[in-house]
Image (spheres, helix red, strand yellow):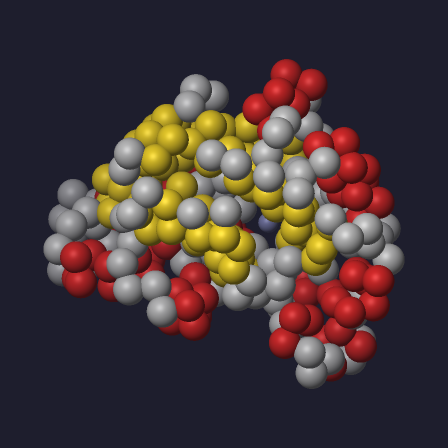
């Protein structure tokens, strides 16, 4: 499996328009973070988790020429806004793209992208095949995904375990019932927004505590705000097994 971090940022650090902080002015490419999502090459399939507003730019950058499915963690706009761009794959591949999400998220997609689901469809718009998921493990084009039910403030969000890889974005609480699903993972990707307390995201300190609990070979932090600090400075504070993710980082496992 090859995991590519398509984006590791958040909407408040894109960088902010006109922001003069050292991260937004940094020339280190690792400080230039697009909205958080991930691409998986696994079992001969090409799957993305979330399609944020930067999706098109991300797949062009990574040269992703084929897409087998989209899986959603939750319905926030920074994770869904790029969905229209899958139409390029509809054209290339001549198929409907399967989309996997929980009931609430599918409803939201059908509201926000009503034209895609309209009875009278304008030519050339995306063609999707919706699949509702629940808390049970499910197969995406033959690849087993185990949902991990976590909380983003009060909003239930799905993390996913795929073989030895676990992806947990947009959360600040992991119920005890979900711990076993994460245990033994080799690679963990984990939300760490900023240093200051936040209503719906893990802080750096909280993320480190979670990473130390699960003891993955490597934990990569994502959904990072410009307020966290410069990539090279923050990494010096972290234990070797915990790294900051950066856009374009590839993990082979
Ligand atoms: Zn969110
Ligand atoms: Zn988010």
- Of 44 and 244, which appears nearest the observer? 44
88 sits left or right of 7 in the view:
left
Write the residue at 69% across / 83% down: 27
Residue 160 visible here? no
Residue extending farthest top: 177
- Of 236 and 195, which appears nearest the observer? 236
Q: Position of residue 206 (x, y in %)?
A: 81, 40
Q: Position of residue 45 (x, y in %)?
A: 30, 47
Disc tally is: 0
When asked about the image quadrant of residue 133, the answer is top left
Where 225 falls versus 186 (above or below)?
A: below
80 sits left or right of 94 in the view:
right
Residue 72 visible here? yes
- Of 195 and 67, which appears nearest the observer? 67
Write the residue at 71% across / 55% down: 243
Q: Position of residue 69 (x, y in %)?
A: 31, 45
Write the residue at 24% across / 40% down: 129
Write the residue at 47% across / 21% down: 135
């Amino acid at each position: 499996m090859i995991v590519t971090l398509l984006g590791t940022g958040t909407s408040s650090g894109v960088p902010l328009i006109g922001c003069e902080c050292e991260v937004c002015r940094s020339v280190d490419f690792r400080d230039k973070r697009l909205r958080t999502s991930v691409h998986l090459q696994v079992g001969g399939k090409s799957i993305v988790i979330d399609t944020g507003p930067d999706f098109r730019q991300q797949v062009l950058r990574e040269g992703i020429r084929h897409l087998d499915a989209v899986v959603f963690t939750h319905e926030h706009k920074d994770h869904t806004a790029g969905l229209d761009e899958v139409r390029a794959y509809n054209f290339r591949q001549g198929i409907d793209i399967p989309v996997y999400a929980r009931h609430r998220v599918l409803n939201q997609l059908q509201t926000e992208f009503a034209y895609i689901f309209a009875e009278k469809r304008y030519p050339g718009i995306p063609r999707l095949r919706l699949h509702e998921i629940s808390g049970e493990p499910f197969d995406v084009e033959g690849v087993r995904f185990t949902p991990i039910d976590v909380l983003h403030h009060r909003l239930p969000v799905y993390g996913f375990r795929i073989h030895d890889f676990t992806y947990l974005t947009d959360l600040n609480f992991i119920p005890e019932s979900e711990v076993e699903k994460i245990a033994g993972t080799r690679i963990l990707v984990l939300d760490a927004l900023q240093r200051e307390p936040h209503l719906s995201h893990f802080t750096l300190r909280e993320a480190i505590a979670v990473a130390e609990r699960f003891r993955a070979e490597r934990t990569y932090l994502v959904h990072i705000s410009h307020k966290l600090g410069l990539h090279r400075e923050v990494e010096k504070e972290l234990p070797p097994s915990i790294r900051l993710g950066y856009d374009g980082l590839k993990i082979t496992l």
